[in-house]
């Protein structure tokens, strides 16, 4: 890792050997002020600057950058918007197939968004039947047991929920997360619920809203043990 003179912008050049890649995950040290507020990912076959393939707006200490499949040896992660203190990276994950369920699935990078606008950093408020979908998410062999969603909701009464469904928007429900008022459509909170059953392997994942005309806006979701 190297930083420029103001210690706010940083570049990490990583040599992974030749690999067929389609996503990179970055896990920053969990401190309130050291999270990345934005970074870019570039790949190359040699040690040059490389081709930019993804730009991420950071709000969480874990971020996944998804891009089209590329064969590359070198990966460059460059901080574009720092927090109050220099960014520290705890772990970098590379995905050869779809994103990892344990990573942060950002709503603005979902392959499918229905019933709400796709924003730069989240969805608009999803109504009943609205959804965000991610294709080919890897759950691995260690089955996660908890769904966490960062959401915002205003005035959604009892009966509102976000359902986690597999392989199809009408597929089997593996978790139902009740939605409670967070104090406004721009007041974000993290809510969690245990999965009803173990999930392994690779699946399309859909987070489907139910219960009202306006249920919740979604920032991100993650599935972990």
Image (cartoon, rainbow, N blue to C red):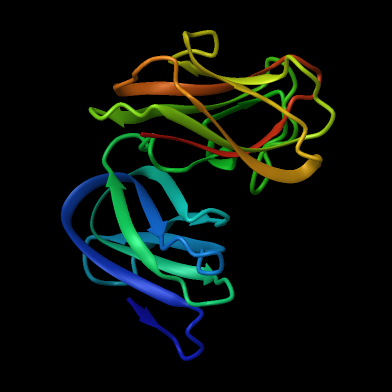
Q: Is residue 79 above or below residue 181?
A: below
Q: Is residue 198 above or below residue 59?
A: above
Instruction: Please name the residue shown 58% across and 55% down the image.
Output: 59
Q: Is residue 72 above or below residue 204?
A: below
Which residue of the protein is positioned furthest toward the left in this rendering?
Answer: 17
- For the image, the number of numbered tags is 0
**Quadrant of the drawing holding the C terminus:** top left
**Quadrant of the drawing holding the N terminus:** bottom left
Which residue of the protein is positioned furthest toward the bottom in this rendering?
Answer: 5
Residue 40 point in image, percent of width and height: 46, 62
Instruction: Please name the residue shown 85% across and 29% down the image.
Output: 155
Q: Does residue 113 appear left or right of residue 87 in this picture?
A: right
Q: Does residue 71 appear left or right of residue 150 in this picture?
A: left
Front position in the image: 105 or 154: 154
Instruction: Please name the residue shown 45% across and 52% down the image.
Output: 62
Q: Quadrant of residue 46?
A: bottom left
Residue 209 point in image, percent of width and height: 66, 20
Q: Is residue 91 above or below residue 216?
A: below
Residue 205 point in image, percent of width and height: 46, 23
Front position in the image: 221 or 25: 221
Instruction: Please name the residue shown 57% across and 71% down the image.
Output: 83
Front position in the image: 41 or 48: 41
Which residue of the protein is positioned furthest toward the right in this rendering?
Answer: 155
Residue 194 point in image, percent of width and height: 47, 24
């Amino acid at each position: 890792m190297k930083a420029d003179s103001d210690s706010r912008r940083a570049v990490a050049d990583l040599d992974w050997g030749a690999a067929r890649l389609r996503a990179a995950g970055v896990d920053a040290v969990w401190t309130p002020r050291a999270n990345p507020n934005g970074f870019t990912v570039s790949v190359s076959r040699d040690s040059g600057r490389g081709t930019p393939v993804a730009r991420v707006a950071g709000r969480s200490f874990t971020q996944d950058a998804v891009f089209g499949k590329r064969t590359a040896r070198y990966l460059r992660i460059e901080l574009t918007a720092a927090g109050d203190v220099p960014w520290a990276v705890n772990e970098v994950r590379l995905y050869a197939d779809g994103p990892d369920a344990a990573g942060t699935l950002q709503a603005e990078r979902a392959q499918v968004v229905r019933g709400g606008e796709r924003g730069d950093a989240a969805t608009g408020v999803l109504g009943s039947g609205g959804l965000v979908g991610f294709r080919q998410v890897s759950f691995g062999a260690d089955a996660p047991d908890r769904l966490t969603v960062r959401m915002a909701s205003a005035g959604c009464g009892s009966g509102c929920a976000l359902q986690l469904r597999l392989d199809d928007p009408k597929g089997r429900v593996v978790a139902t997360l009740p939605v409670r008022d967070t104090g406004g459509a721009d007041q974000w909170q993290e809510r969690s619920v245990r999965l009803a059953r173990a999930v392994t392997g690779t699946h399309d994942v859909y987070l489907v809203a139910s219960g009202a005309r306006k249920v919740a806006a979604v920032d991100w979701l993650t599935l972990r043990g």
